[in-house]
Image (cartoon, rainbow, N blue to C red):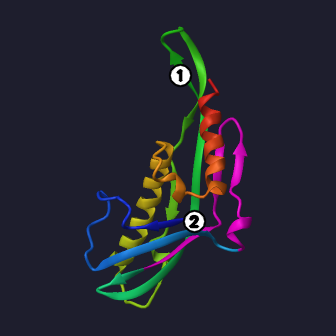
Amino acid sequence: MDFDEKDKVEKLDDVAPNTAITDLVASLKPQTGAQDDFDFDLHIEEKYLGAESANLMFQGSGKYDGKDFTFSGPITLLKYHYALGQKFNEEMNYQSNVFQEQPFVLDIDSKAVTFEGAELSESDKDFVAKKFSNKLKHMKSEIQAAKEDKIPQFPMDIAVPYVLIFYATQFAE
């Protein structure tokens, strides 16, 4: 899955602007093995209906003050899940069981990211990691909202478990 900073993500609240770093492009990949053989760990349980992986990484390239650089780093955990909860149905006057989305987890340690081709400060490295993290979270939200222009950028072998989880929770009531 490729992310290009030219895609619209203008406002990043927790990332200070950095004009020295430009042309960032990154990909989400398995840490080992072929991308075609990669699978998320799927869970179908009462308290955990979702998918996760601790076997992902990201790598990419960019420019720092006009000089090309590359970077890569592990994703310690990517987790998307729902848990069984309850919701009172006012209209029908009963307590119903529903699957409620839990916080999306994307753990990236900017100190574990390696850079080659340019000397970046710790804050610059943190900027690259946060920019990637925010872009991935933004794409997840866009896809959940069924933004048609984002769906072609999201490979179906990754999207299918999320679609299954999303619709399973919608029909769980």
Q: Which residue is disc 2 drawn over?
A: 76
Q: CA distance from mark 1 to mark 2?
A: 33 Å
Front-lying residue, 95 or 163: 163
Q: Residue at x 36, y 66 (%)?
A: 6
| Segment tinted magenta in the rendering | 33-61
Q: Residue at x 51, y 49 (%)?
A: 104
Residue 79 higher or lower than 124, as above or below: above
**Helix, strand or loop at mark 1:** strand
Q: Which residue is disc 1 drawn over?
A: 87
Would you say 63 lies left or right of 163 here?
A: left
Q: Residue at x 42, y 60 (%)?
A: 135
Q: Amino acid at mark 1?
A: Lys
Q: Position of residue 25 (x, y in %)?
A: 44, 73
Disc on the earlier residue, 1 or 2:
2
Residue 48 higher or lower than 75, as above or below: above
Would you say 53 lies left or right of 37 here?
A: left
Does the segment drawn in magenta span residue 8? no
Residue 105 higher or lower than 163, as above or below: below
Q: Amino acid at mark 2?
A: Thr
> Residue 37 lies in what quarter of the image?
bottom right
> Residue 34 lies in what quarter of the image?
bottom right
